[in-house]
Image: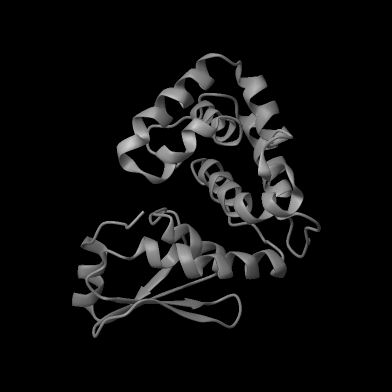
Amino acid sequence: MLVMAGQTRQGRYAQEERRELSDLLLELGPDQPTLCTGWTTRDLAAHLVARDRKPQTLPGLAIPQLHKITERVERATRESHSYEDLVALVRKGAPVWHPAHVALVDEMINHVEYFVHHEDVRRAQPDWKPRDLDVAERDKLWKALKMVGKLGVRKSPVGVVAERTDGEGRQVLRSGGRQVVLAGAAPELLLYAFNRREQALVDIRGDDTAIADFRAAPSGL
């Protein structure tokens, strides 16, 4: 499932991430670990199906007080489908009544979601390696960091700056007198912002005290 060095991917990135994730889910089977705490590959597939097809799950994805509703719908989705059917629905994407059935909307709301969950499955397996994504996709992930990154470090007691190592770019994610610098490729910085900190290939730079304070703070997501 790794993209060969130098290979580029054309077209809609949300669709490509969905296709590659579906292939990997089928290859691994339903009981493999993911980076989502407590979730197997079956659980992750059920989450994606419910997200795309069960509107009642959406409020609970953003509002903690409603998350129990989301969990119940995801559990029902997992238990009412075979694993193969769940993966087939993941691959199919949103139904015709859903806004994400439109290609442009799909790309806007699903590219990052499917990129992160694709990596959740890949990086939970032994001997994973970072993919060689094309420049255009890396640039899109860098742009997505502007919003997600600020949320991800909003509880930091020190300032946080993201510096891109796979191209030019610097973003202030949180202002502060003391600061740390997160240096890495755009996909790695985005994964770090989504609290995949142990698996993201990011270098934290700054004085020892600032780094320690930053590491001690919980994620904002």
Tell me if residue 14 comes above or below residue 96 in the rendering.
below
How many numbered marks are there? 0
Colour setup of the view: one colour
Give me the residue at 67% from left, 44% from top.
Answer: 99
Q: Is residue 33 left or right of residue 86?
A: left
Looking at the picture, how far across and down is residue 207, in whole percent?
Answer: 24, 81
Looking at the picture, how far across and down is residue 105, in whole percent?
Answer: 68, 52
- Is residue 199 visible to the viewer in this orientation of the structure? yes
Looking at the picture, how far across and down is residue 53, in whole percent?
Answer: 60, 31
Give me the residue at 43% from left, 66% from top.
Answer: 149
Residue 183: quarter of image: bottom left
Q: Is residue 138 left or right of residue 190?
A: right
Tell me if residue 54 comes above or below residue 208 in the rendering.
above
Residue 89: quarter of image: top right
Looking at the picture, how far across and down is residue 177, in whole percent?
Answer: 24, 85
- Is residue 44 visible to the viewer in this orientation of the structure? no
Give me the residue at 52% from left, 40% from top.
Answer: 125
Question: Looking at the figure, which quarter contains the N terminus?
Answer: top right
Q: Nearer the viewer, residue 10 or 103?
A: 103
Q: Nearer the viewer, residue 125 or 190?
A: 190
Tell me if residue 21 comes above or below residue 199 in the rendering.
above
Tell me if residue 6 comes above or below residue 94 in the rendering.
below
Q: Is residue 197 left or right of residue 130?
A: left
Q: Residue furthest front?
A: 97
Give me the residue at 41% from left, 71% from top.
Answer: 203
Q: Residue furthest right?
A: 10
